[in-house]
Image (cartoon, rainbow, N blue to C red):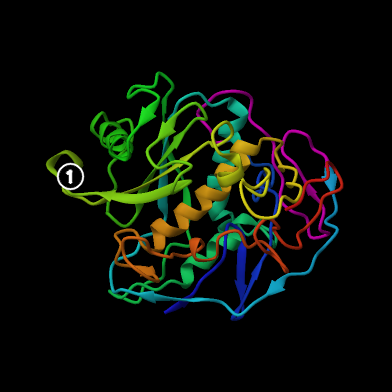
């Protein structure tokens, strides 16, 4: 069994678990460039400085966190169900962009994915996306006691801005997008079933079965076939909720749809939909690598499992409750919180 690490930036060090929110557009590799295929000029990024000062990509504005304490809490424990994990490093996250995304939106998500393995280069300061992601290495697989994937990186990308399957998708269409991308060789097959995953992202004008009703994102897997080289293909989906249900899938950057109607936080990148997507991308990625085939780490019924991150949805800091994210880091540059 292993401790749960909560939400997108839960840290676990020396047996303790804490929650912290950091800039979603933070650069965890100094002077990294935008890795998106959506076009546009590359964005210059920088890491959180040891002094606690950070810079937002593009704007190059600096701010000093106003709160620097972590919330330590007794963690939940997840059971291991003896199945394989995504444990062959590095794990490539191949992306299908479905619909219309701006270059800036692609850069935000692309840089976030690329930053997951930045701690390997020794340039990621704490707290950071990569030091949070490194926590996945604490989830051990049974076969050889091999660690879970603490090394992940942005893989190949495909743009489908012609809405090849329309603007109203079923869940089976998400799998079909992955299968067609692999079949056309727009995205590669994995060398091993344990070192790749596929991420389908839909734009705000695309509806997906269950979106805004039961989920903001999900992960599943495609069964082996001759078309995919006889391999299980784990994949995930996240949608942009900006014009559909931001109070559900982009909270705390939008007014919640239920509970106390406290003021929402200012989105770090001034894009409620995309910043909300980053939260949900972190959630499904952690679920994929620690429970890719519904036989890994989870608690509860296999049909509706509580996984790493999703087991403590909505908890960001001390004193959190429905409608309130808790005590967070604050930036003076635009009033946003992290």
Give the side of residue 20 with respect to residue 97, left or right.
Answer: right
Q: Residue furthest top?
A: 162
Count of marks overlaid on the render: 1
Can you say whether 65 is above or below 62 in the image? below
Give the side of residue 121 with respect to residue 53, left or right.
Answer: left
Magenta stretch encompasses residue 160: no
Q: Residue furthest left?
A: 226
Question: In the depicted view, which residue is nearer to us: 29 or 3?
Answer: 3
Q: Residue at x 60, y 80 (%)?
A: 74
Question: In the depicted view, which residue is nearer to us: 70 or 243?
Answer: 243
Residue 45: x percent and y percent?
A: 69, 41
Q: Residue at x 31, y 75 (%)?
A: 142
Quarter occupied by the N terminus: bottom left
Give the side of residue 320 with respect to residue 155, left or right.
Answer: right
Residue range of the region highlighted in magenta in the rendering: 35-61
Secondary structure under badge 1? loop
Can you say whether 204 is above or below 307 in the image? above
Magenta stretch encompasses residue 59: yes
Identify residue for label 1. Answer: 229
Residue 4: x percent and y percent?
A: 51, 71
Label 1 environment density (alpha carbons within 10 Å; few <14, some 14–19, many ≥20): some
Question: In the depicted view, which residue is nearer to us: 292 or 272?
Answer: 272
Residue 27: x percent and y percent?
A: 67, 46
Quarter of the view holding residue 81: bottom left
Dominant secondary structure (helix, strand or loop) of the stretch shown in magenta:
loop
Q: Residue at x 34, y 72 (%)?
A: 141
Residue 133: x percent and y percent?
A: 54, 60
Quarter of the view holding residue 156: top left
């Amino acid at each position: 069994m292993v401790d749960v690490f909560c939400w997108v930036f839960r840290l676990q060090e020396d047996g303790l678990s804490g929650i912290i929110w950091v800039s979603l557009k933070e650069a965890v590799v100094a002077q990294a460039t935008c890795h998106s295929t959506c076009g546009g000029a590359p964005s210059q990024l920088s890491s959180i400085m040891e002094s606690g000062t950070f810079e937002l990509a593009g704007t190059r504005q600096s701010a000093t966190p106003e709160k620097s304490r972590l919330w330590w809490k007794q963690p939940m424990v997840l059971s291991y169900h003896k199945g394989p994990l995504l444990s062959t490093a590095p794990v490539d996250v191949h992306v299908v962009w479905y619909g219309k995304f701006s270059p800036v939106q692609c850069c935000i998500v692309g840089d976030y994915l690329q930053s997951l393995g930045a701690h390997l280069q020794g340039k990621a300061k704490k707290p950071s996306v990569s030091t949070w992601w490194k926590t996945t290495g604490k989830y051990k697989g049974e076969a050889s006691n091999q660690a879970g994937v603490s090394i992940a990186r942005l893989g190949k990308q495909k743009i489908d801005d012609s809405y090849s399957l329309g603007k109203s998708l079923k869940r089976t269409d998400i799998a079909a997008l992955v299968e067609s991308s692999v079949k056309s060789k727009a995205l590669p097959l994995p060398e091993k079933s344990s070192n790749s995953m596929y991420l389908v992202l839909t734009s705000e004008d695309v509806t997906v079965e269950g979106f805004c009703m039961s989920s903001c994102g999900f992960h599943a897997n495609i069964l082996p076939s001759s078309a995919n080289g006889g391999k299980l293909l784990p994949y995930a989906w996240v949608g942009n909720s900006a014009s559909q249900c931001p109070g559900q899938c982009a909270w705390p950057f939008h007014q919640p749809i239920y509970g106390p109607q406290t003021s929402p936080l200012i989105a770090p990148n001034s894009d409620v939909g995309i910043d909300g997507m980053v939260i949900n991308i972190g959630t499904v990625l952690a679920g994929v690598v620690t429970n890719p085939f519904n036989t890994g780490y989870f608690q509860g019924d296999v049909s509706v499992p509580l996984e790493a991150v999703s087991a403590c949805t909505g908890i960001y800091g001390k004193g959190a409750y429905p409608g309130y994210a808790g005590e967070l880091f604050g930036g003076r540059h635009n009033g946003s919180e992290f």
